[in-house]
Amino acid sequence: MPAGDDVTARTAARRRPPDAPEAGGPPATVAGNGTAGFSGDGGPAEEGQLAFPADVAAGGGAFFVADHANHRIRRIDGDGTLTTIAGDGLRGFAGDGADAARARLGFPSSLAVAPDGGVLVADEMNHRIRRIDPSGIIDTIAGDGSRTGDHGNGDGGPADRARLDAPCAVAVDGAGSVYIGEAGSRSVRRIDGDGVIGTVVAATGRIGGSGAADAGEAFLPAGLAVDAAGQLYIADPPGRRVLLLGSDGALRVLAGPPDGGDGATAVDWSAPCAVAVDGQGAVHVADLNGHRVWRLADGAARVVAGPDPAAGEAADAVAGTVLRYPCGLAADPAGRLLVADNFHHRIAALPLTVAPSLDLDPEEGEKPVPEQELEPEGELEPEGEQEPEGEQEPEGEQEPEREQKPEREPEPNRGAGSTQDGDGGPVTVQTARLLVRQEVGLEVPRGGSELIHVRISSTDPWAPGRVEHHFRAPTGFVFDGRVTSAYYRADRTVLPGGEPTGTVRDDGRSLTVTDEPRLNIPGHPAAALIYTLGVRALGDAAPGRYTDGRAVIAGRPEERLRASVLGDDED
């Protein structure tokens, strides 16, 4: 693999292996600083930025991250140094046969490390499986880029000429056979050592004449893992099950709801979406919507991270305090369970022998954040595109210190530029200094829909009352009227937003949002507010990058919004 960028002596001096997580304690962060973005190559991994990491895999003394919204694969060496080994940051398909760091990926969703040290990538939106060899060259090993259709899927033929439909999971066994979970076809495919592909598991009605095992109607192979005996484990969120495909081809339910089947371990989880098997044969499962990680061993299941139902903790009551939508797992030979903590933009680590964790109780009055309000759909701008100085977030303002919660929660004053003291009386404060910026850049095909995320952060109290924010769409785009919001505290936990209303004007070119924002006030210690706005690229828009959008927050100076329209050959 490429060694990565040169680093300064100061950075080199700070390099060290990640701290081992403490048994029974909260998961340790081994990569990602908790803020979505792209940075940190050549430095300590825990100080770098990731963007909605989708999976993690370990092998060869390192671990690898599917940096989903950055369209990159990141590597963390044994000394904790972060580098990019694949992807230039732009969504697309390019680069086979050349340096992987200059290639293009399309939302990589899953990883596996092969016995020869190659890294396999489920390149989901390119409908391919890519392989990065130890020298850093990338190639396609499965999928011709087209989705399964009337012309068949290519079973029985060369894998690189077959059709894959949104490959979302990949695993490899000790003999080098590759397993692929497809979200579109709801099936699991296998590539044997001779490069021939076939279907081994499929949903009812999608089996055809393949001879594959029938997984039932509610089936989606979101996560795969293979144990030392060559058995395949399948995380199936719709069925709320983990399935086991034996070496003899027999499929059974390993764990699932109490009524899930004879011999299955009863687990009342929400959406098992990833699975990993450690060296002792214990099975670990990421429960996406339950914000938990489970451990299955000796016919029993227990929670090792996240809210524990056995302790009476509800998933929605503490969502975000430890894990937020965990979606990828890997058993590290160093004795850690690595977790892709998606909405915390980090890789977390647990000791494989960890005791059940107990989360802190939520602050009084906090409520769960509706999932649809935070679903990421934006993309990050490629490295090297510099923002104007006015849009850079000043050092020290990104994570203001958390304010202490008072004994009772007063309501904010309705007047602009004021808040309330502990006795409920108004306290006049200086005008709050706000930092307004767009969270991520967008690349949208003509006629496609996306989301723009506008972040407002401050270290000052801000409770202006009911105000209007005005937005202007970049050239080639219109607003569709979707508006949601969420608050982020300094400790990176999430609070539900209010109920902003949006009014579209000028045939969609303009959007007015009415809301009552609050930052850094007693009882509501949120340091940042993010508005999520729905946009659509016009069908006749000229391809190109446009930076003439505008955001005017509560009458403050405007900030620009940017987005790119993709041509038909760039989808």
Image (cartoon, rainbow, N blue to C red):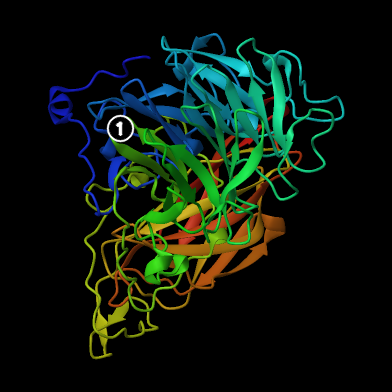
The x, y position of residue 232, in whole percent, is 56, 33
Q: In this view, does 457 lie above or below 46?
A: below
Left or right of residue 569: residue 135: left
The x, y position of residue 6, in whole percent, is 25, 18
The x, y position of residue 172, in whole percent, is 52, 24
Q: Mark 1 points at which residue?
A: 40
Observer able to see residue 571: no
Look at the image and tell me in which quarter the N terminus lies: top left
Q: Which residue is drawn at 52% across and 43% down?
A: 562
Left or right of residue 159: residue 37: left
Task: Determine the residue located farthest toward the right in the rendered image.
Answer: 150
Q: Out of 535 and 60, give the one closest to the viewer.
A: 60
Observer able to see residue 307: yes
Q: Residue at x 47, y 77 (%)?
A: 466
Q: Out of 296 and 224, give the one closest to the viewer.
A: 296
Q: Is residue 414 above or below residue 362?
A: below
Q: In this view, does 410 lie above or below 185?
A: below
**Quick one: SS at disc 1?**
loop
Left or right of residue 550: residue 450: right
User: Disc 1 residue type?
Assistant: Gly
Q: Which residue is drawn at 44% across and 69% down?
A: 314
The x, y position of residue 259, in whole percent, is 63, 61
Look at the image and tell me in which quarter the C terminus lies: top right
**Mark 1: few/some/many CA within 10 Å (<14, 14-19, 20+):** many
